[in-house]
Image (cartoon, grey):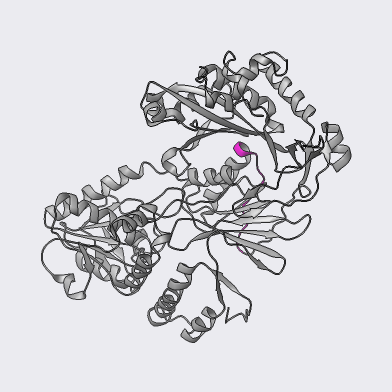
């Protein structure tokens, strides 16, 4: 801001505003004192910049000129958010910029909570564009086993980490393990920036994982007040006996972590655990490139000094960046019209770009630094009412395709007791603007007239309440709105039943079932599970059809533990995927087809 003469506002979340001055000052000091960089900003510039900061809370919308800006929780590090930026006025566009995010909840932070905003463009990081990580629990067990084995034989463990985030995550893991195993081996973490950042984690507890907040609320115990972990001092570097030390920076490219490494690398009892990737050219990258078959293992420091490596080296990824599975999961959740991939290896980005284009059928761009791109988009969505007769005809056509007859509602269907599950599905319950026209069922008023439904609230903001024209056919939509409604998202609900023993593995069961109807090259895949912050639902995608399966509302604990589960499946697809959507629905009904119990929940499914 100060070097380029920027005088506008700088938007930050409260935790970012708190920790930012220390991060900037640490960076300035390292670059000027150790690397002798010229033209760096000064401490006075940092202070001047902080005076321009305007804090913004989660889901709070701030108007700046003709833009509305709203942040959403992104995980990754304390205070990280994804920003939704919307233009104000008719025909305006919207962009969601993810920044760095994590789709998997951690011990110290929750998973990203970015809803289905349906922006025109989603800009996503792609650090791990082609990586699919294994089980997080498995990596944690490998980490604990490696640490325990090393200290048991009298060795020292060095864990190079960055000052913000990874220290908190791994310290919480070791705290819990130390308490369970009643271990007395000392654990240390570096002071300075790491200590300052940790204070802010303790202060902004409401931004951390819900379990930490719950522990403090219930017991007044802050789990970030560590019992077994204390601050490291330089004299401990040569102290005898086993110990575990977290030290920054994470790439071993200077600072305390490199200093400790040069002291401990020559002892075969010791160990270095790299908990993330390392940038090419750093000592950490050299260390990860060593092979067990190398006759002589050594790395070269910045001053061309060689260090012989006799200690053990392990790489266990605990990165706060999401992997390829998480990126695809965010895309299917947010539902953009176009994608832009940034922040990653060029070759890996190209591979992910090709997958997004082929599997998700989205235009996807991968610009280089400073490159300007043009993203062609359809005209801004319009909203309209759809006449009941059009929905009625759509339901009849879909029922006919499913082999359930083409008739409308009958008295037997209204009773809901004798009909198969498919007869009581909601039908095309709603349609939401994606690219083209949004349609909503017409609502009857008390005086026999009709009106638009009340504007729906979505994450704190209301949809525009402008009057919507009434449409009766697709041709009418094309004539009245000047566009053909071919890009409209439909959804429907069906009731399914499955054995209770299937629930923990339902995602894979759905994939196996849907493989029968997925035309090549489409492959069904699990994109979310109840353990991944998906609000208790299994989410599967095949082509342009998304399926979310959850326990039906009102399911009791007894029913969950019983032999049969009553499930509710929500299917979403674009009109362009109508045929595949019908095949998927018919397949689910055939494979998980048992009528739900008659009663209040069965009657509730008659709503259309």
Image: 11 above or below 530: below
Q: Please provide percent x and percent y for residue 589.
A: 56, 20
Please say whether residue 92 is one of the residues in the magenta stretch. no
Q: Please provide percent x and percent y for residue 314.
A: 28, 52
Image: 243 above or below 122: below
Q: Quadrant location of the N terminus?
A: bottom right
Question: Between 43 and 288, which is closer to the camera in this rendering?
Answer: 43
Identify the residue at horizontal 73%, vertical 15% (top origin).
407
Question: Between 360 and 606, which is closer to the camera in this rendering?
Answer: 606
Task: Place residue 312 in its image quadrant.
Answer: bottom left
Q: Is residue 95 visible?
A: yes
Q: Which residues are magenta?
A: 359-369
Task: Place residue 98 in its image quadrant.
Answer: bottom right
Q: Please provide percent x and percent y for residue 151.
A: 15, 55
In the visual, does 208 lie left or right of 354?
left
Image: 568 above or below 265: above
Question: Between 468 and 530, which is closer to the camera in this rendering?
Answer: 468
Q: Residue furthest front?
A: 447
Q: Please provide percent x and percent y for residue 394.
A: 74, 25
Identify the residue at horizontal 36%, vertical 63% (top origin).
251
Please say whether residue 360 is one of the residues in the magenta stretch. yes
Prevailing SS of the magenta stretch: loop
């Amino acid at each position: 801001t100060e070097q380029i003469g920027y005088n506008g506002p700088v938007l930050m979340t409260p935790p970012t505003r708190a920790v930012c001055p220390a991060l900037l000052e640490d960076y300035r000091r390292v670059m000027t004192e150790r690397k002798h960089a010229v033209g760096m900003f000064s401490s006075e510039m940092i202070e001047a910049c902080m005076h321009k900061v305007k804090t913004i809370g989660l889901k709070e919308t701030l108007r700046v000129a003709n833009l509305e800006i709203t942040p959403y929780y992104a995980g990754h590090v304390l205070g990280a958010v994804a920003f939704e930026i919307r233009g104000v006025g008719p025909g305006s566009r919207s962009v969601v910029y993810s920044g760095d995010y994590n789709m998997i909840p951690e011990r110290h932070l929750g998973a990203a909570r970015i809803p289905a905003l349906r922006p025109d463009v989603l800009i996503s990081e792609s650090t791990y564009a082609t990586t699919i990580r294994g089980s997080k629990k498995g990596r944690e067990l490998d980490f604990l086993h490696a640490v325990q084995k090393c200290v048991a034989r009298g060795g020292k463990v060095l864990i190079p980490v960055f000052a913000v985030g990874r220290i908190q995550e791994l310290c919480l893991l070791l705290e819990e393990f130390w308490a369970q195993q009643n271990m007395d081996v000392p654990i240390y973490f570096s002071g300075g920036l790491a200590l300052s950042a940790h204070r802010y984690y303790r202060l902004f507890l409401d931004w951390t994982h819900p379990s930490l907040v719950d522990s403090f609320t219930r017991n007044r115990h802050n789990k970030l007040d560590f019992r077994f972990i204390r601050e490291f001092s330089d004299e401990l570097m040569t102290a005898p006996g086993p110990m575990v030390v977290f030290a920054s920076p994470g790439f071993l490219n200077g600072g305390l972590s490199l200093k400790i490494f040069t002291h401990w690398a020559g002892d075969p009892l010791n160990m270095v655990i790299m908990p993330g990737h390392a940038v090419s050219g750093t000592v950490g990258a050299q260390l990860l490139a060593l092979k067990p078959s190398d006759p002589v293992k050594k790395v070269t420091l910045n001053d061309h000094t060689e260090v012989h490596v006799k200690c053990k080296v392990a790489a266990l990824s605990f990165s706060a960046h999401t992997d390829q599975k998480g990126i695809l999961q965010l895309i299917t959740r947010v539902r953009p019209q176009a994608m832009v991939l940034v922040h990653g290896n060029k070759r890996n980005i190209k591979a992910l770009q090709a997958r997004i284009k082929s599997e998700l059928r989205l235009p996807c761009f991968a610009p280089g630094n400073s490159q300007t791109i043009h993203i062609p988009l359809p005209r801004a969505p319009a909203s309209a009412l759809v006449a009941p007769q059009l929905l009625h005809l759509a339901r009849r056509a879909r029922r006919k395709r499913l082999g359930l007859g083409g008739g409308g509602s009958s008295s037997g269907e209204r009773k809901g007791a004798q009909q198969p599950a498919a007869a009581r599905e909601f039908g095309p319950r709603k349609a939401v603007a994606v690219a083209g026209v949004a349609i909503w069922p017409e609502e009857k008023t008390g005086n026999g007239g009709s009106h638009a439904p009340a504007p729906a609230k979505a994450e704190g903001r209301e949809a525009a309440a402008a009057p919507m024209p009434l449409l009766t056919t697709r041709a009418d939509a094309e004539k009245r709105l000047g566009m053909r409604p071919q890009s409209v998202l439909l959804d429907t609900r069906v009731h399914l039943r499955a054995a209770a023993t299937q629930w923990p593995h339902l995602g894979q069961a759905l994939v196996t079932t849907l493989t029968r109807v997925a035309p090549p090259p489409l492959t069904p895949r699990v994109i979310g599970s109840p353990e991944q912050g998906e609000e208790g639902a299994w989410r599967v995608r095949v082509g342009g059809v998304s399926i979310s399966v959850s326990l039906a509302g009102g399911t009791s604990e007894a029913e969950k533990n019983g032999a049969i589960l009553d499930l509710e499946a929500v299917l979403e697809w674009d009109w362009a995927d109508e045929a595949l959507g019908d095949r998927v629905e018919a397949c689910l009904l055939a494979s998980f087809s048992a009528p739900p119990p008659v009663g209040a929940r069965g009657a509730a499914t008659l709503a259309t």
